[in-house]
Image (cartoon, rainbow, N blue to C red):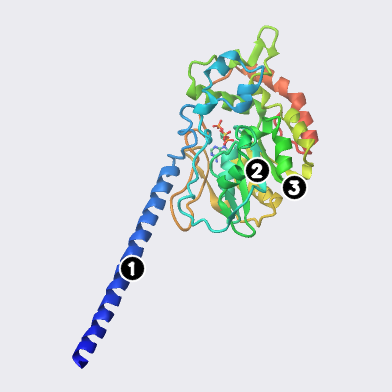
Amino acid sequence: MAFWSGASALGSKVSRRLLFMFTLSLSVTYLFYSLMSCYNSLQENYVFQGRLVTEEATLGSSHFSQSERTTPGFRAEERTRAPPTEARPDFSTTDSDPRANCTLDYGVKKLPQAIIIGVKKGGTRALLEALRVHPDVRAVGNEPHFFDRNYEKGLDWYRELMPSTLEGQITMEKTPSYFVTNHAPKRIHSMARDIKLIMVVRNPVTRAISDYTQTLSKRPEIPTFEVLAFKNRTLGLIDASWSALRIGIYALHLESWMQYFPLSQMHFVSGERLIVDPAGEMAKVQDFLGLKRIVTDKHFYFNKTKGFPCLKKPEDSGAPRCLGKSKGRTHPQIEPEVIRRLHKFYKPFNMMFYQMTGQNFEWE
Ligand SMILES: Nc1ncnc2c1ncn2[C@@H]1O[C@H](COP(=O)(O)OS(=O)(=O)O)[C@@H](OP(=O)(O)O)[C@H]1O
């Protein structure tokens, strides 16, 4: 009897141990695969020392922006080449979110409290990626295009795109086309009147060339910059309806935003300074967002191959991160006379912009 009870006690001890071992091995296997998928995701999304990010790799089929497609003055030949809206993925102009697979999504999804609204080719991706280093910032990696292309999908759809945040963390997104979207100021205001808006602005002439370079990379058959820039070259008549030029009339677009938001809710980042002094610009952005200055010069290094500042290797994992090939492309040579003419064209608008913002961006 004693033998049998002893044996059964031993048996249940052994089976409990077996059960424990089994559960443990399952957990370890799960953990291993989670880490592997996280590692793979990081590898897919970040460039390691010079190869990078997928921003426009995913853009392969490249599109014109919504505003370009809907602006009456936009060139007919460009409009006809834009693919139909249905063919366009929601996140057409972006890289994916490298952290999404790796972070357990604690917290709640909130609508953004701050948005990088522009400008296209200003340096918006560099700013967002630097901000994402901050532990109190959580941002969606792709461009949601909610206030221009997806508004009818509703705020719940938009919120669902956001990463979860913990108490004290700021939810952010960037969609540079908002800056030139007529409805965007009103729509954003009706979502959150106290939202913080960030604009990365860059010399409108260089911005236009950068914009053109991007289009050219996808549609090599388009006319030259010089041809597109003029309505009548002999008369020196600039074609301000060409989106690459129109976007750079910052004062005009800013006026629409100022009808809904006070300047105190807007912050202007110099695209030029973001390249030569990323930490300096980041200090101002963090102040504006009410964040502790955590992203500092310790986080950046200048990558000679890339020719731009890149983010240093994070303490916990990975490699240094530079932006992808679609950022920092070589621009085509534009006739100096055309550049001079464009500087002249933008000068009064730039002056107006400096006055409106109270900042001199020194583009003259
Ligand atoms: N750190 C760093 N690395 C690479 N590129 C940088 C960086 N900081 C600013 N820039 C400039 O960002 C320009 C692209 O701007 P955006 O990210 O706003 O482009 S987009 O509108 O999202 O397509 C891009 O324009 P191009 O040089 O014309 O490609 C860069 O000049």
Answer whether residue 119 is visible to the viewer in this image. no
Which residue has dot 3 on it? Answer: 194
* Crowding near the residue tagged with mark 2, few <14, some 14–19, many ≥20 C-alpha atoms within 10 Å: many
Q: Estimate the spatial distance between the alpha carbons at disc 3 and disc 1, rounded to whole Å.
A: 50 Å
- Which numbered disc flags the more N-terminal residue, 3 or 2? 2
Q: Quadrant of the C terminus?
A: top right
Which residue occupies 32% across, 73% down?
A: 20
8 w.r.t. 197: above or below: below
Q: Is residue 179 left or right of residue 8?
A: right
Which residue has dot 1 on it? Answer: 23
Q: Secondary structure at mark 3?
A: loop
Q: Are marks 1 and 2 in contact (CB under 8 Å)?
A: no
* Crowding near the residue tagged with mark 3, few <14, some 14–19, many ≥20 C-alpha atoms within 10 Å: some
292 w.r.t. 19: above or below: above
- Amino acid marked by disc 1: Thr
Q: Secondary structure at mark 2?
A: strand
